[in-house]
Image (cartoon, rainbow, N blue to C red):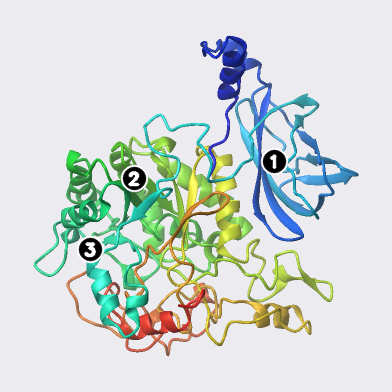
Amino acid sequence: MSRARTAILGALALIAAGSGGAAAAVPAEAVAAIPCTVDYKVQSQWDTGFTAAVTITNNGAAKSSWAVKWSYAGNQKVTSGWNAKITQSGAAVTAANESYNGTLGTGSSTSFGFNGSYSGTNALPTSFTLDGVTCNVDDGSGGGGTDPDPDPSGKVDNPYSGAKVYVNPEWSAKAAAETGGSRISSQPTGVWLDRIAAINGSSTSMGLRAHLDAALAQKGSGEEVVQLVVYDLPGRDCAALASNGELGPTEIGKYKTQFIDPIAAILADSKYAGLRIVTTIEIDSLPNLVTNTGSRATATPACDTMLANGNYVKGVGYALAKLGAIPNVYNYIDAGHHGWLGWDDNFAPSATLFKQAATSEGATVDDVHGFITNTANYSALKENNFTINDTVNGTSVRQSKWVDWNRYVDELSYAQGFRTQLVSVGFNSGIGMLIDTSRNGWGGTARPAGPGATTSVDTYVDGGRYDRRIHMGNWCNQSGAGLGERPKAAPATGIDAYVWMKPPGESDGSSSAIANDEGKGFDRMCDPTYTGNARNGNSLSGALPNAPLSGHWFSAQFQELMKNAYPAL
């Protein structure tokens, strides 16, 4: 992740250079005189091509239309784009607004993206204009360098950089007890705070303080990240019974005072100030308000209730405000996955809703360090055998049954693209993304070695895709899934880390109804005989049989994940 070089910092640098290195105050009129900034990022790159995202901020008079221009020093060619009309003549490129995004107010930003080809070196453009006026421009360096825009709170740019990550001894012991499990039992995984009782723990399970104390013991003299999943909203996960929570739809007060407040009090203890605490905020909540409400075929009465009462938005905002105020806590909001929010009618509305939540109940965008995708899900990290721009006999890959008009085919492209969208609606330009790779490897004998047959667009996609689910709406204990990329800091542009936030081997839900006192219902999507619903195209669930309650150890799944790991163990 790279924090964009802001116009103010650019002005500071110029003043310092002109005064022997002593930085003077920047006059307000000098800041106002900077007409525009452009942030150009190469999100992904391969031997012959790349994907780029561009964010424009207009500091001048409001515009009803706009055009950005730049030139390449090499042989780069724009091949396709989105959210702008992009033309190229020789090395010169012009990106003009579409009919729906021409308005650009003073202080407002807009974003677009494109795919391009190149050979040799893909050098970054060095100068941009907005309607003929030269803009200040970010250095486009991507992740891994010195943060040019330090967080005023004292937080580091990427908490995972240069740090060990906490290995949960409870999960590690279960993994090591499995045949072959010692190969991964030392990997870091998330600690799930999914009910009030999890905060204090019990005689058989560690509470939050016990985990933090264990993290201090592991830390030694270096830096240590602790990963927590904060997951107990009122009316939690309104579209899936297996992960329904203990709090009713109206119990927002109990959520605040009995769940978030005690967590915040523990995390704020000065004893733990030397830890970097990463929080994943309320998975599977806000995305449900976009996709499973109103007149959509996927709507549920429970999600309509949570949209109407606003308690998802209030709960997330409250959690962000309370936890974000702690100097060593880094909040990452759950952002679904590409097979959930990657469609045009979900993508932008989701970013707008996240901004609403992040500015409610006393929270601000400064309380959000980033977002996490694919939490506890199975979407492939990178589909190498086809791209969203491929065609088969004149038919776009987007028209295949699997892609179904989505704009993304994998998690890496989605996470990078969604990051740009989030910045465009007002989140800080320095936000970073996490991707949960705990179960999206899809290796083993079923992993395709190349593209499918070009008989049709469906044979091409289905024959080449790594993700072997029957339908990308399937989410419960998926048969054939494997461990994905091992946890890793700063693996790609805009990505703070690949993480195993969902501990491999912990069930998504039971295959049949099991009485329990954890508030967990039986969801037919966890039943391998279920023939589906509107959310998975009325397909078989693809779930493994004989699964226990969500969060409980599932040995058969753990063995399946190791067998199908990619990279292989």
Label placed on residue 314: 2
Q: Residue at x 17, y 59 (%)?
A: 207
User: Would you identify the image quadrant in which residue 246 lies?
Assistant: bottom left
In the rendered view, would you say 148 is above or below 376?
Answer: above
Q: Is residue 252 left or right of residue 464?
A: left
Distance from label 1 to label 3 (Cα)? 43 Å
**Looking at this rendering, what residue extends furthest in the right direction?**
90
Q: Position of residue 310 (x, y in %)?
A: 36, 48
Q: Position of residue 428 (x, y in %)?
A: 50, 37
Q: Position of residue 450 (x, y in %)?
A: 69, 79
Q: Position of residue 208 (x, y in %)?
A: 19, 55
In the rendered view, would you say 213 is above or below 273?
Answer: below
Q: Is residue 109 visible?
A: yes
Residue flagged by tag 2: what amino acid is it?
Lys
Nearest the viewer among 198 and 560 is 560
Residue flagged by tag 3: what amino acid is it?
Glu
In the rendered view, would you say 564 is above or below 303?
Answer: below
Neighbourhood count class around disc 1 (C-alpha, 10 Å): few under 14, some 14–19, many 20 upward: some
Q: Residue at x 60, y 52 (%)?
A: 417
| Residue identifier under label 1 | 101
- Is there a contact, CB below 8 Å, between mark 1 and mark 2? no
Nearest the viewer among 258 and 230 is 230
| Residue identifier under label 3 | 246
